Amino acid sequence: MKLFSFFLPQFHFDKMNDLFWEKEFTDWVTTTRANSLFVGHEQPFLPSSDLGYYDLSKTFTLNKQANIAKKYGLDGFGIYHYFFDEKTKALNIPIENLRKHTSIDIDYFICWVNADWDKEWVGDYKTILYKQKYSPVIYEKLAEDACIHFQDSRYVRIEGKPLFYIHNPKYLVLDEFKERFMQISIKYGFNEVLFAAPQIHISAGQECEIDYALGYPPGDYPLRNVKLESEAYRNIEGGVFSYPQYAEKYSSFILSKLNEHNYVPTILSGWDNTPRYKERGFVFKDFNTYDFSILTHSILQSSIKKNKDFV
């Protein structure tokens, strides 16, 4: 069984971010500008000395992250990939550098994040910065791009079949998408591709089209079960939640789902999106490595017993 981590390539300069936000914007800007919103709220939460304020456009950074991941038992990364239409990608430098530099010793697979870019971060739900588009031509170009990565010996394959993750399959006519995608992949010699997606984003009727249905914390569990009620947290619209309680209850939740044959557990560490959303965000309070380790160990051991292909 393999253990993968999602990899969000947001920590490097990008022309789209320059255009839509500000010059040389990255998520480090939101990180350093964060404020503590209640007593005991650990913000700003700044990077450790392992990597510091890293720049993912640098090959050195990718190599160091790969070494750290391998050291602690991670087999690879599922890398978020933004492919809006046949001509437009974004935040693509890290994955392209990874493909180019085969000496970076880490497995990886593509997570196509088929979603619009908007200004939700700043409370603007109407402005679309870049629209995710859909057409047979886009599916073919996306497949051609994917097949360049499928050819890499580090690309994640299960029984020889490359893994491709779709973030929002509900936005697709999935059988049409897969037909176009497979027409291209077969030309490249990949006669079978395994498709994965978050379980909560798979529409009714799409289940048989998806090979792996992944957990998607924190959105797949009713957090009202672990919400902390305190006057001190009233200004946090999303809520403040107990991580120790969450780790215990989420472990039981996952264990109840492991008999679903294509279900893949996904484990969440801490969470605090208030650096982006301010008071509109939500926070896991009292994250600690002990509860995280208990959650992780429990799920890994149970997944091995259930012969899951990966976590």
Image: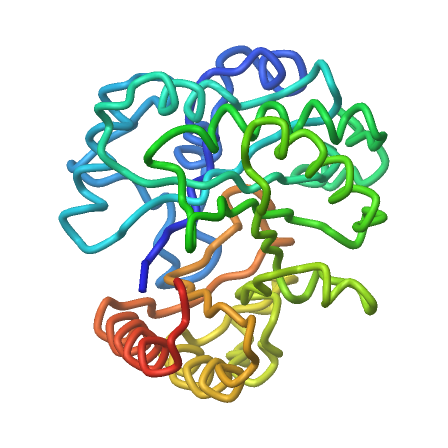
Which residue sits at x=64%, y=47%?
Answer: 166
In this picture, residue 219 sits left or right of residue 57 = right
**Residue at 56%, 81% in the rendered image:** 260
Residue at screen point 47% across, 55% down: 272
Q: Compared with residue 223, is residue 252 higher up or lower down, i.e. above or below?
A: below
Please state the total of marks drawn on the protein image. Answer: 0
Question: In the rendered view of the protein, which quadrant contains the N terminus?
Answer: bottom left
Q: Position of residue 35 (x, y in %)?
A: 45, 44
Q: Quadrant of residue 84?
A: top right
- Foreground of the two, 274 or 99: 99
Quadrant position of residue 156: top left
Horizontal arrangement in the rendering, residue 74 relative to residue 5 (left or right): left
Height in image: 21 above or below 305? above
Residue at image location 61% in from the left, 39% down from the top: 112
Q: Is residue 100 left or right of residue 117?
A: left
In front of the other: 263 or 286: 263
Q: Check the picture and name the quadrant holding the C terminus.
A: bottom left
Figure colour scheme = rainbow
Question: x, y percentage for residue 221?
Answer: 58, 76
Q: Position of residue 3 (x, y in %)?
A: 32, 58
Q: Check the image and report above or below for 70 versus 305.
A: above
Q: Nearer the viewer, residue 272 or 118?
A: 118
Where 149 sits versus 97, above or below? below
Q: Quadrant of residue 249?
A: bottom left
**In the image, is 92 to the left or to the right of 205?**
left
Q: Viewer-proximal residue, 51 or 120? A: 51
Percent coordinates x, y for residue 302 in the rendering: 34, 82
